[in-house]
Amino acid sequence: MSERLSSPKAARLYGVTNDYIARLCRNGKLEGVLEGRTWMVDQKSLVEFFARQGKGPPREGERVELLTSREAARVYR
């Protein structure tokens, strides 16, 4: 496993909710380890998943609009 990010940080980075990142980890779409109540997400897995969806992290200074878990599930299937 490469470097890990907390699920809240990963969610902020990609403009989705923490719940959505947690769901991706539970469903095996992202590699992650549950530490207490927080998922620690493998950074390489995160980058690869969103790259397959055609989405990279926002550029510096770019405004990010958060999606609800339901909206994100429709967009990033």
Image (spheres, rainbow, N blue to C red):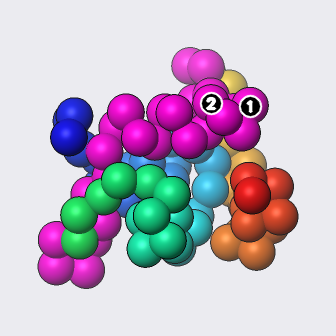
Q: Quadrant of the N terminus?
A: top left
Query: Residue, x 56% and y 41% (percent of image)?
Result: 49
Q: Nearer the viewer, residue 68 or 28?
A: 28
The percent position of residue 42, horizontal first and vertical second, equals 31, 45
Q: Quadrant of the C terminus?
A: bottom right
- Secondary structure category for the residue under label 1: loop
Q: Amino acid at mark 1?
A: Gly
Query: Residue, x 61% and y 20% (percent of image)?
Result: 59
The answer to whether residue 6 is seen in the rendering is yes
Query: Residue, x 43% and y 48% (percent of image)?
Result: 10
Query: Residue, x 52% and y 64% (percent of image)?
Result: 24
Span highlighted in magenta in the image: 35-60
Residue, far top? 60
Above or below, 54 against 24 in this view is above
For the image shown, how many numbered marks are present on the structure? 2
Question: Badge 1: few (under 14), some or many (20 or more) residues near its Cα, within 10 Å?
Answer: few
Name the mark on residue 51: 2
Residue, far bottom? 37
Locate residue 41 relative to residue 74 in the image: left or right.
left
Residue, far front? 28
